[in-house]
Image (cartoon, grey):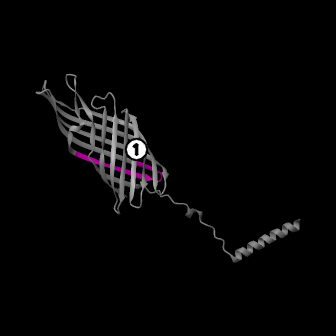
């Protein structure tokens, strides 16, 4: 038995010596076969223009305790607009901030019979700030999907001069409202080819409002300097018991430029 074991060991050593002398064994570098994920922060700045349509009704409380209403459709003059978004991504984590400021004005006259009428001269400003943290759940060569959660704030300020048939002089009112909501949703991209892609974002939330939701989808095109995107966006708010406004919608197309750095 000892002779058999000794012979086996000697034979193995002789075979290994022969292999070392006549051939080279290549050991693959396993690390080079695993895709590397960059830890560098990637930044994206989007500047866009959006002149949204408004749906809703403003309800003003007058000094005598009664209410009078004006429709959002009367705001037909755009006074000022400032909009943009910023996104930072590191690995699977991301941060997104989106800001909208719109200032509009308009006049409305409501006939009451053949003589009496109520007229409104109004200026309205709306600002919406959305802040999200995101985590990438799905990523392939063509698709990506992030789960997002965060906060959206909504502020509305109105300056209204109201001429009533039974009140003199003109009634001047400056109501305002501030709403803060927690939101959760998804965002991502669908790559069509080397240049064309479809980014999207959907969220829903509650808090100070009874319900708020947002949905947008875009068509983007890559250039050497950045991207151009065309988007349709819809934002909805519901708040029962709020005297100034209960239901409110902003919607319409927008166009923007995206810069990566």
- The quarter of the image holding the N terminus is bottom right
Residue ID at (34%, 29%):
240
Numbered range of the magenta stretch: 80-95
**Residue 12 is drawn in which quadrant?**
bottom right
Specify whether 20 is left or right of 144.
right
Residue ID at (36%, 40%):
152
Decide whether residue 88 is among the magenta residues: yes
Task: State the residue lying farthest toward the front.
Answer: 114
Q: Position of residue 260 (x, y in %)?
A: 37, 57
Q: Main secondary structure of the magenta part?
A: strand
Q: Position of residue 73 (x, y in %)?
A: 23, 38
Picture mark count: 1
Residue ID at (37%, 32%):
210
Specify whether 124 is left or right of 194.
left
| Res. 170 visible in picture | no
Neighbor class of circle 1 (other Cα within 10 Å; few <14, some 14-19, many 20+) is some
Decide whether residue 43 is among the magenta residues: no
According to the picture, the residue beneath numbered tag 1 turns out to be 202
Q: Position of residue 142 (x, y in %)?
A: 46, 56
């Amino acid at each position: 038995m000892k002779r058999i074991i000794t012979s086996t060991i000697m034979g193995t050593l002789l075979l290994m010596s022969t292999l070392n002398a006549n051939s080279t064994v290549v050991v693959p570098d396993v690390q080079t076969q695993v895709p590397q994920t960059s830890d560098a922060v990637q930044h994206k700045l989007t500047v866009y223009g959006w002149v949204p349509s408004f749906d809703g009704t403003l309800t003003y409380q007058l000094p005598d305790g009664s209410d009078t209403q004006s429709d959002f459709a009367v705001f037909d003059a755009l006074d000022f607009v400032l909009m943009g978004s910023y996104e930072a991504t590191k690995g699977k984590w991301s941060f997104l901030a989106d800001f909208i400021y719109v200032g509009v004005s308009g006049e409305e006259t409501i006939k009451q019979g053949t003589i009496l009428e109520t007229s409104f001269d109004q200026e309205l400003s709306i600002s919406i700030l959305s802040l999200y943290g995101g985590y990438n759940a799905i990523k392939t060569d063509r698709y990506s999907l992030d789960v997002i959660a965060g906060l959206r704030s909504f502020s509305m300020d109105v300056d209204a001069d109201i001429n009533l048939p039974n009140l003199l002089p003109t009634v001047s009112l400056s109501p305002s409202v501030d709403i803060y909501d927690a939101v959760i949703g998804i965002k991502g991209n669908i790559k069509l080819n080397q240049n064309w892609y479809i980014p999207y974002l959907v969220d829903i939330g509650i808090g100070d409002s009874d319900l708020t939701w947002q949905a947008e989808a875009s068509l983007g095109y890559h250039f050497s300097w950045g991207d151009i995107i065309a988007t349709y966006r819809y934002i909805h708010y519901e708040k029962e018991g709020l005297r100034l406004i209960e239901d409110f919608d902003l919607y319409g197309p927008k166009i923007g430029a995206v810069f990566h750095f």
